[in-house]
Amino acid sequence: MFRKIALVLSALLSIPSAPVSAAPVNPIAIIKTIPLDQDIAGMLVGDTAIYLFGNTPTGGYITALNKDGSEKWMHSFSDLRSFTISTGALDASGNIWLAGASAAPIAIPSAPNPSPTAANPDGVIIGDEGAIRPDLTNLTLWKVSSAGSGAGRYELPLTAPVLPTSLSVNKSGVSIVAWQSAGSLFVTADLVGNFGKQLRVGKTTTTLDKVVRNSDGSSILLGSSTELFLSNKAIGIRDGIILKVDATSKIVQSVRSGEKAASRNWASATASLLIGGYLKSKTTTLATITKFGTTLKPTWSVRYKATSSAVVANGAGTTTYAAYENSGSGSLVTFDKNGKAISTNSFLGQPIAVEFNKTFGLYIYTGSYIYNLVSK
């Protein structure tokens, strides 16, 4: 599922940035090969484990891995409900929060029981033959402890199918963005599962791919759109958008990233507002990386020739990372605080998730492999 979301995945910058060519060097080590039949929705990296979460034909799961990729524990979600898990995040205590959609199964009426006169020497009782998959209209949160124990499930019933695309959690609560056919959705919840006011963001042409929750309860929403927000009109064919929503779920700031005759998107971000995305025009496709300040003004920006969006992560101190693919070859670029590239590493495939933890280090998930950047 996450692979599909990743493929579906760019603020008019005052700082000009020409495309940069970074030659991949120093290959990154593979620590785990992902089986072809394993459906992984995402990867998280915490203080004690690497976490993979996803879905199976009978339910969802989250598994914890050691540094070397070996399994530490697995927690399975299986009940009588239909559901899918699509995104996740870690809180400050190491709990894993997962978001998805669920619904109670719909029973299929069985055929009428045979007449009493029919031969039934074994006394077989014929009941319901099964259930069909209903529309998944309940936005659902699951909480799992760092030890792998279920710690809560919370549901918000909606009137139409929903697919969460990102969640962010801190001490003040949880922020979620989700796809719906009538427009993207933003909603918050407290840490005991009480959902707040829903905000419809745009109509049919707006997609929200990432959310960052701030300590004051406000949130930064990222994605792409052709629609008008706070009088900011479209610039290109499709613009990347950055929206700030206050603690009352009101849009208070809008920044567009657009270029004439081009499509842009923002789909990856860190808590310090290092933001990654892409730009596509008739002549080129670029991975775009920009560091924004707290007022949503850019401080530095770079672009690389690429066939994928940029996925970003904060490192130790002021170090930051961005990964992207260019025709099958992946590059991981390490930046200093001013946006200067200080090293480049190579891997194969399209980066889906890049996660860093000071204890575990940096890991890249591509759908086929998990890579680990070994610290020197």
Image: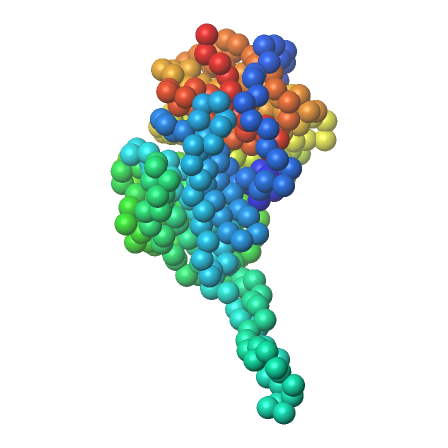
The residue nearer to you, when weighing 127 against 289, is 127
Name the residue at the right extreme.
283
The residue nearer to you, when weighing 279 against 118, is 118
Image location of residue 108, percent across then percent down: 57, 72
Image location of residue 313, percent across then percent down: 45, 24
> Is the image coloured rainbow, by chain, by secondary structure, or in one colour?
rainbow
Looking at the image, which residue is at 43% across and 19% down? 361
- Does 291 sit above or below residue 188? above
- Residue 63 in view of the camera: yes
- Does 79 sit above or below residue 250? below
- Does 153 sit above or below residue 346? below
Count of labels shown? Answer: 0
Image location of residue 123, percent across then percent down: 56, 80
> Which quadrant is home to the N terminus?
top right
Looking at the image, which residue is at 45% across and 47% down? 76
Q: Decide if residue 267 is on the left or right side of residue 93.
A: right
Q: Decide if residue 349 is on the left or right side of residue 68.
A: right
Name the residue at the bottom extreme.
117
Looking at the image, which residue is at 56% across and 17% down? 29
Looking at the image, which residue is at 51% across and 43% down? 54
- Residue 202 in view of the camera: no
The residue nearer to you, when weighing 8 against 129, is 129
Q: Decide if residue 179 is on the left or right side of residue 294.
A: right
Res 172 quadrant in image = top left
Image location of residue 212, percent across then percent down: 39, 36
